Image (cartoon, helix red, strand yellow):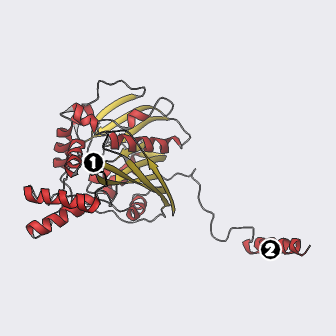
Amino acid sequence: MLQKTFSLNRSIFSVKSFSCIKKYSTAANQQQKPSAFMVFNRETKRIQRDRSSIDIEESRKVDYLKDEIAYRMVDRLLDIKRKFNTIVDLGSGCGHIIKHVDKDVMKKLIMCDISSKMLERDKDINYEVDVERIVVDEELLPFDDNSLEAVLSNLSLHWVNDLPGAMIQIRKSLKPDGVFIASILGGDTLFELRTSFQLAESEREGGISPRVSPMTNTRDIGSLLSRAGFNLTTIDTDDIVVNYPSMFELIQDLRSMGESNAVLTRRPFLKRDTLLSASAIYKELYGNPDGSVPATFQIIYMIGWKPDVSQPKPLSRGSGQVSLKETLKGGDGKSNKSNDN
């Protein structure tokens, strides 16, 4: 596994900054049968996303994270040397991918989201690429088999209950040699917030509850893509750290993004003293010298291709015509002879 460390400074708000750690890996193909498990309340998630779009100006202020990840996804799309006619943006939200594409990349983008209000937030903005907006549940795709050239999904699929099933639907909807590029929040996302709530609830209430939604681990994504039937799968991750004045600004931004907790077994209320205790623990354990607190967002990027006969395949075992042993032996001989001279 290759690991690349770098830093990124952006003037989004005066109190927020980014730092990133980037990792790369490739996944081997494994075929397994998908299964469904209910974790999230999809109706609750739709309501949260609807509510987050009511205040348009406040909603636009918190686009900084999804806009940044959308830019990085489009950068991956540009590595594919082909021009697309139509691309589907699954879980598009208010429109983050569309901000970074032009006619040289595609002719049309179909924005799909479970929230009609999110889709309509920026409907009056004109883009270089033609846009179509459709209300779609990521768990029930309406597209015909072999009908799409490419599917993108930016920070949306981590709210899907049956992730393998959703990936299978995406693969079926793609044309042969079609590409699927997605980003989701990984398991280390908001570990500071999760730990602070667990410690505070354990101290104040004698137990813990799921205040931060469970998320997929990086090591599982390769298996999920393979179960869905994708070829040539690639995975890489970014750890993005955003600094906030306190835990309360972080929670407010998550709410404005439509990224609040939607776990079925979540508790419907939180005591005031527990909340204040969590904030104090957060600052004590993770606080920065300037008084701000960091929030880590682990972003997992994935790329998979629908199988096609035109794709490169490994040669069958034993078909090689050149002996590696003899090649290396000949190289050593030449090297020794030159040293003797």
Q: Position of residue 163 (x, y in %)?
A: 31, 56
Quadrant containing the C terminus in the rendered view: bottom right
Task: Report the residue that reaches farthest toward the right.
Answer: 341
Q: Which amino acid does label 1 sit on?
A: Tyr
Q: Can residue 204 be seen in this view?
A: yes
Image point (30%, 33%), residue name:
133
Give the SS element for disc 2. Answer: helix
Residue identified by numbered label 2: 332
Label 1, residues with CA under 10 Å away: few <14, some 14-19, many ≥20: many
Q: Position of residue 268 (x, y in %)?
A: 9, 55
Q: Which of 11 and 164 is in front in this view?
A: 11
Image point (80%, 70%), residue name:
331
Image point (9%, 66%), residue name:
204
Residue identified by numbered label 1: 244
Image point (79%, 75%), residue name:
329
Q: What residue type is labelled 2?
A: Asp
